[in-house]
Amino acid sequence: MKLLKDILYGVSLSAVSGDTNVMINNVHFDSRQVEMDDVFVAVRGTLTDGHKYIQKAVELGAKAVVCEELPDILVNGVTYLKVVDSNSALAVLASNFYDNPSKNLKLVGITGTNGKTTVSTLLYNLFKKAGYKVGLISTIKIMVDKKEYKTNHTTPDVLTINQRLSQMNEDGVEFCFMEVSSHGIHQKRSEGLHFAGAIFTNLSHDHLDYHKNFAEYRDIKKKLFDALPKSAFALTNLDDKNGKVMLQNTKARKQSYALKTYADYRAQILEKQFNGQLLKIDDNELWSKLIGDFNAYNLLAIYATADLLGLEKMETLKLISELENVDGRFQYFISKEKITAIVDYAHTPDALKNVLVTINALRTGNENVITVVGCGGDRDKSKRPVMGHIASEMSNQAIFTSDNPRTESPTTIIEEMEAGVEPQNTRKVLSIENRKQAIKTACKLALANDIILVAGKGHETYQETDGVRVDFDDFKEVKAALAELDK
């Protein structure tokens, strides 16, 4: 148990009703989880308002309530704490409740439109190979050294973050690498955390269903850097036009990386093949199994971060050469019939373009590229025609299909993708709503040496329609379809 007034340290209170000198068991923002002597934080979410459930939380035994608006009826024996922003208050409460665990390790946040999962996961893998105890908080999973926990959000809620960081403290973890999404920053999930450094990968079209415009999306990402302390480092990609913006107001030590412009850390691509690429970093050549310009940026960010965290440079280069692809990120195999199948998480216009640019750069010109792609429902609609245009323009054959339609009509989503197809490319487009059938069709159309790209879902192992998730794994589906044809 913790003393309420102790976990309130740093929370900006505008009104207090009741006693703060009381012991509390736990902190919750979901009223259904509240038990006797807990604190309930009423948070305004996108789907519901926690203020509606204050009475329910009190009935379940809440000893304290944190809210932006005090309820009309205040129950005796319950402490009510009014704040301006419940999300900010929750972040500070969570950190205090778990004894500020982020201060006891080196936490590095990774933000940007593309590359967050690859950079964070590969940093985790690299530092593990270097012999350290490491933590990871990513889209795919949370790792507390060797213990794995599933996650459904790019940036988990602040209670989960601090709980896992606390576990890392107990297990002696020295470094933790954490994806920090724009949603997470906007909802204050990264507040109350002490970052030793932050990395900016790139910024392109995404999440404009959530953010008002691109400028807001960019400025929210920037808040991670604005909040860094002087003791931290701020590492940014200078080849991205928004790279310098991230550093404008930060107190942290400014560092940069780039392939095309002058920067603190630079790399050059010397050779590209399907099984890897030859890179030159700091005048040292290394072979990496990860291919594409986007991965060259990712690897350079990893090298720079390792250096800033004190790893020896030559050891880092050796470890980078041993790194494998992250699940669902340019994950590929070649069938018996010599058909190459690639599965990638590319679900934004920029990511899709990057993958297709990489594929087309590796072609001899005789192979066909067949792209299977869809767009998620209840998400940014403006990117649908753009992705339709890119897939049809840069492939010999494009198959538009479903990708987590959620509550939207899959047919409507596909029609919005078709709207971006230029007249000269319409003959190259097929629309097959059923994703399994779309993948099978791509495999049947492919000939020896052709390349199939299945984009959008990557590591995901489900397809979500009308709130129901069914098992679906792009990599397994394309592998099974090609194996059937091999027979």
Image (cartoon, grey):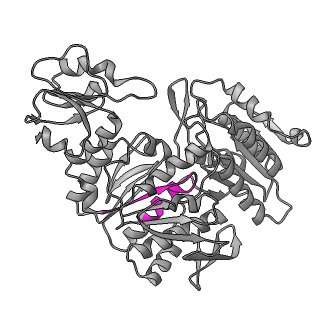
Is residue 338 visible in the rendered structure shown here?
Answer: no
* Up/down of 56 relative to 349, above or below: above
Say left or right for 172 vs 464: left
Say left or right for 410 vs 133: right
Outermost top residue: 73
Say left or right for 201 vs 291: left
Residue beneath the point at 58% across and 74% down: 263
Residue beneath the point at 77% across and 65% down: 361
Foreground of the two, 385 or 91: 91
Which stretch is magenta?
Answer: 106-123
* Up/down of 485 relative to 413, above or below: below
Say left or right for 267 vs 96: right
Give the x, y percent position of residue 102.
28, 56
Based on the displayed image, in which of its 4 quarters is residue 363 positioned? bottom right
Foreground of the two, 433 or 388: 388
Outermost bottom residue: 283
* Up/down of 261 relative to 55, above or below: below
Based on the displayed image, in which of its 4 quarters is residue 135 positioned? bottom left
Q: Confirm whether the magenta stretch covers residue 109.
A: yes
Based on the displayed image, in which of its 4 quarters is residue 39 positioned? top left
Give the x, y percent position of residue 167.
24, 53
| On-image quarter of the N terminus | top left
Foreground of the two, 310 or 52: 52
Q: Confirm whether the magenta stretch covers residue 379.
A: no
Foreground of the two, 89 or 277: 89
Residue beneath the point at 47% across and 75% down: 319
Outermost right residue: 424
Is residue 232 visible in the rendered structure shown here?
Answer: yes
Give the x, y percent position of residue 421.
83, 39
Give the x, y percent position of residue 236.
53, 64
